[in-house]
Amino acid sequence: MVPRAPAGYKRAHMKLRTVPAAAASRGPLTFVLVPDGALPEVGAPLRGALAAAKATGDLATGARKVSLFHQPAKAALRRLGCVGLGDRKKVDTEALRRAAAVAQAAAERQGTKDFALVVPAAACAGVDAEAAGRAIAEGLVLGAYVYEPPRQQKPKPRAGQQCRIAVDGAPKRDERAFTRGVELGRIAAEATVFARDLENQPSNIATPTALAQAARRLAGGRVKVKVLDRAAMERLGMGALLGVARGSAEPPKFLVLEYRARGKTTKNACVIGKGLTFDTGGISIKPAGKMDEMRYDMCGAGAVLGFFHALAHGALGDHEPKHNLIGLVAAAENMPGHNAQKPGDVVRAMDGHTIEVLNTDAEGRLVLADAICYAKKFHDPAVMVDLATLTGAVVVALGHEMAGIMGNDQKTIDALIAAGKQADEPLWQLPLWDCHRDQMKSKFADLANINSPAHGNGSTAGGAFLSYFAGDTPWAHLDIAGAAYGGLHKDYYKGGAAGTAVRTLLHWARTL
């Protein structure tokens, strides 16, 4: 029997609200962000005590350092905490995001349900007010995230799950921008949490059918959802995707999500996710060690679904894109069943390209090939972006702290790199040249799904293969195999799935 979450279980999201600074100075616990060399503006009664604490070295203002001071029993504020920001000149959105996550963790350790966070405007003077509010909200919500696995007992209520946020000393215009940023950051972070939950689930729970159900729950308002089953894919000639799914008892699903722009625009921007809910490698089976981590092989799909979760909840704010946003997810399992495709088999993609499957463990590019073909046939995209945990080679090249990007349109690549910088999810461009495309030609079909081991450049080879299906349509490929999971802990990420690229896609969508 497949384990499920306990009956009645629903994730309790971190609750945020912005309040005046005076309202944040009351209650069980208030944190203030403090850069090096500064005293927090907390009013005359505490100024002397904090000055003395600083003089004796008890007030830690180094980056992410926490100081906690207990107040008299009858005081309106029972505990005052300070979270250090470090060098004022180095305070940026990442520093604010991490400091907010540190405050949330400290509040949870103190066992308080409700706490406040005061952000002195002078402490983040070098950061745009809206960006600061967004980073603070993201740090609080993402820092509070804990994956709740299926267990016999319901998860117990956790402390530190409600926060009142105040910006202190900012002009009214900046205060409004900060408040707007907090709301947008909350929506983006909750969408990232949605993606993390999907990505962390074991593959017997997060099946292609379960992804389809998750997508359907996003439908409503400006978001429409359609799910194609195996029979529909067969009618469309999606032989590359169906070849991957042949070895599994789990039926494949193809998800189509649409966010319609207001007005009469006919321009479409397609975001395409690899949804391999488990990848054994098929007949070219992977080593047993860490094969369980292949639950994360659907993190490209997680990013697309998280992106649409955010769109459905108003993540673009006042921005109205000039493109309809189309999400496509190719969801399947890659298993070595009795009917599984074999090395040397030739399959035909939806656009007619024939593909020699030299290695069944290079399956992600096969399902993406048909997804790209579908995008071009039915949505005539002005631009396409695909996201996939495609290659181990990108981890070798770039590690876990950034994703690789390549494509056929430098404008699109540059826009995504800029969006990743805004989200603090860095992207590094890899080359994609004609010589790489030549490596993907086959003697027994139009294309092979891998190049020769003698060529190397495994990550670029995956992109080069996909470029044949993208054709002349402006397109970028994000290989998120490293960034999707396994990165360094950074306060708002503590392991497991990172929910990579949801926030990057949102920043990118605001440029459309």
Image: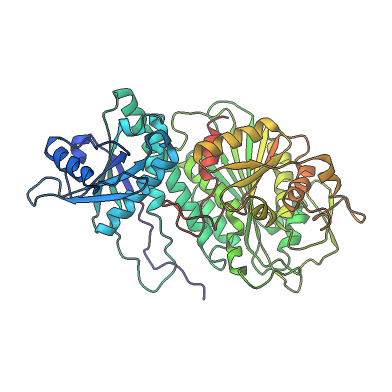
Q: Could you tell me residue 43's position as x and y percent? A: 16, 35
Residue 37 appears in which quarter of the rendering? top left
Q: How many marks?
A: 0
Q: Could you tell me residue 340's position as x and y percent? A: 76, 68
User: For this view, does 347 lie left or right of residue 34?
Assistant: right
The residue drawn where x is 43% and y is 61% is 147
User: For this view, does 96 lie left or right of residue 456?
Assistant: left
The residue drawn where x is 36% and y is 52% is 13
Q: Where is 302 relative to 259, above or below?
A: below
Q: Where is 29 relative to 344, above or below?
A: above
Whether residue 186 is visible here, answered yes or no, is: no
Q: Could you tell me residue 438's position as x and y percent? A: 86, 45
Residue 280 appears in which quarter of the rendering? bottom right
Observer-nearest residue: 126 or 434?
126
Observer-nearest residue: 434 or 321?
434
User: For this view, does 128 lie left or right of residue 275?
Assistant: left
Extreme-right residue of the structure: 443
The residue drawn where x is 33% and y is 23% is 173
The residue drawn where x is 30% and y is 54% is 106
Q: Where is 294 relative to 130, above or below?
A: below
Q: Could you tell me residue 229's position as x and y percent? A: 66, 57
Give the quadrant of the C terminus: top right
Extreme-left residue of the structure: 74
Extreme-bottom residue of the structure: 1
**Colour scheme shown:** rainbow
User: For this view, does 392 lie left or right of residue 505?
Assistant: right
Whether residue 428 is visible here, answered yes or no, is: yes
